[in-house]
Image (cartoon, helix red, strand yellow):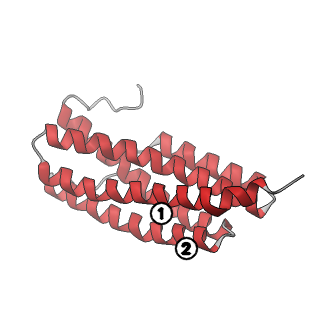
Amino acid sequence: MGLFSKDIATFDDLFLHQLQDVYYAENQITKALPKMADKATSPSLKTGFETHLRETEGQIVRLERIFELLGEKPKAVTCPAIDGIIKEANEVAGEIEDKAVLDAGLIASAQAVEHYEIARYGTLIAWANQLGRPEIAAILQETLDEEYATDDKLTAMATGKINPKAEAVTA
């Protein structure tokens, strides 16, 4: 069996499975963000992680509302992709000694998470619309907008101060 379970027979089943996947991912992210905030040395990066944690908690509430609209109980299915991204982030953070370089690495890891979420939510919005569920698409769009905004903030932090500071580090 591949990544999908055998009980996916319809487009609706696939949609639900992907909702369960992203529900798992968001819950894992709420566990990872406090650790990333603790490791960050840039005050703005630390604050950004803390802010995104609160947003992610709200995103989980939205997903639970979507499950309710679908007449389903919130359920997570393991998402190997997010597990891998978080594992890699932990490994990278554990291998970097210089604090300026560490912050650049943390941003790169956070953006990998954001890009995964952007891909998932974009797909789910398209599918919700295809399935005739514009109210669900609208809820998902709120989250996608937050993910794009977080990615933009991370890029601004990286290019504005953090990457130049990391580049200045010499061996």
Check contact, mark 2 vs mark 1: CB within 8 A. Answer: no
| Residue 48 horizontal/vertical position (percent) | 52, 68
| Residue 49 horizontal/vertical position (percent) | 53, 67
The residue at the point 18 percent across, 30 percent down is 10
Q: Which residue is mark 2?
A: 47
In the picture provided, is 164 more to the left or to the right than 57?
Answer: right
| Residue 124 horizontal/vertical position (percent) | 27, 43
Does 61 sit above or below residue 104? below
Between residues 63 and 6, which one lies in front from this camera angle?
A: 63
Amino acid at the residue labelled 1: Thr
Q: Residues within 10 Å of mark 1 (few under 14, many from 20)?
A: some
Between residues 162 and 83, which one lies in front from this camera angle?
A: 162
Does 27 sit above or below residue 91? below
In the picture provided, is 100 more to the left or to the right than 48?
Answer: right
Amino acid at the residue labelled 2: Thr
Q: Which residue is mark 1?
A: 30
Residue 108's disc is: none
Q: Residues within 10 Å of mark 2 (few under 14, many from 20)?
A: few
Does 70 sit above or below residue 120? below
Examine the image and state in which quarter residue 101 appears.
Answer: bottom right
The residue at the point 15 percent across, 51 percent down is 70
Q: Quadrant of the N terminus?
A: top left
The residue at the point 77 percent across, 52 percent down is 95
The residue at the point 19 percent across, 32 percent down is 11
Examine the image and state in which quarter residue 164 appears.
Answer: bottom right
- Which badge, 2 or 1, is on the more N-terminal residue? 1
Examine the image and state in which quarter residue 168 appears.
Answer: bottom right
Q: Is residue 71 visible?
A: no
Secondary structure found at label 2: helix
Q: CA distance from mark 2 to mark 1?
A: 15 Å
The outermost residue toward the left is 132
| Residue 60 horizontal/vertical position (percent) | 34, 62
